Amino acid sequence: MSQAKNDKLKATILREVFEENLRIDAPGPRQRSRIVREGRKLIRLAPLLLGCLALAVFFLLEPEQPKPTPELPSTSQTIFPWHEIIYTPHLLAETPVPLPRVSFDASRLLNYDLLLNRQDVRLRSVFGLESRTIVIDPGHGGRDPGAIGNQGTMEKDIVLDIARRLKKELDKNSLYNVLLTREDDTFVSLAERVAFANRHRADLFISLHINALPQKEFNVTETYYFGPPSDIHTLRLAEQENRGSEIKTGDFKDMIKKIGNVLKEQESATLATTIQHNLFSNLKKYDRIIADRGIKIAPFVVLLGVEAPSVLVEISCISKNEEEANLNSAAYREKITTSLEKGINAYLGRPQTQVVKGEKNGKEIGNQNS
């Protein structure tokens, strides 16, 4: 077979194969009708499909709304203006955290009237404060004799003896640490007495004195705490006791700032009341005409300087001959000591049961002191 016939035969076969493939791919009458039906269904469902698609896009792209702040219950006194809310951004936080805006109003928030202006409320009790270190201050000493009686009895000697006796009694209680500003007949300035009490962090300060009132016909006992004088006699007494204090003007200015110390003033008044009550009640047994001058306020510099509650006790009147004789009696001074001890314990709210410093079989010894 020639080459030309051979090529013609191949072309004929390829054309027939191509035409056959066209017949296979082309849909028949049934297939064409099915395609038309499916197309019409899609056209009818198109609006529904488009609506679903739109809703999906809406929910996916809508930004997240912040959650509403819950309302706080109303109170009779609103301390913070909760309706004003600020947002503090936090690092890596997706949403801000609402915080209240604090509006400080001292007249509304800080009302200390119940604590500071009620006589039946004691700050020492409210805050559970303890009194451990008691400083007893026998007045005068050394070159300063204090008041002198008609028989030559000197105030400095009487108050030193009473102070020693009082320390001995209080030392029986293991809870107390009792100190004296002077142990013997030496001169100690008021500035040194103040520094001593503050250096030892005194919880109570009791200064012992004996008055001299020649113009009075009766014996007098009175107890003072710091404050402005109520009469000319009190002012003159303060001038006498403050003489030679050796306190500098600069230091006195710092001491003046302490006048507003409510805790010290309140506790000093309470301590003065208990001591005066017990002292007068016991001395009246020996002197029926003794006068109770009560608790008084006076600007004694030694009371101002000491940081702890502090009082000055004018035990009696040495200018009266009968009282001077009594003060020279050791038994009488012991009764005065007992009265002062009871007053201190009454202030501290402790019974007269003393805990003796000592051990017996490994336990503390209890001693009932009437």
Image: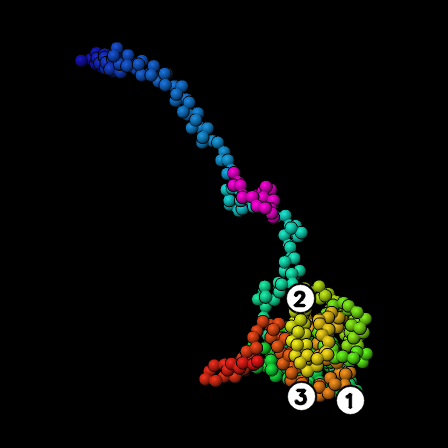
The residue depicted at 67 percent of the width and 85 percent of the height is 332
The image shows residue 272 at horizontal and vertical percentages of: 67, 72
Question: Circle 2 is placed at which residue position?
Answer: 266
* In-image side of 262 versus 16 (left or right): right
Residue 151's tag is 1
- Mark 1–mark 3 Cα distance, whole angstroms, equals 17 Å
**Secondary structure category for the residue under label 1:** loop
**Amino acid type of the residue tagged 3 in the rendering:** Ala
**Amino acid type of the residue tagged 1 in the rendering:** Gln
The image shows residue 248 at horizontal and vertical percentages of: 78, 73
The image shows residue 96 at horizontal and vertical percentages of: 53, 43
Residue 33 visible, this angle: yes
The crowd level at tag 1 (other Cα within 10 Å; few <14, some 14-19, many 20+) is: few
* In-image side of 154 versus 57 (left or right): right
Magenta part of the protein: which range?
68-89
Q: Is residue 78 magenta?
A: yes
**Amino acid type of the residue tagged 2 in the rendering:** Gln
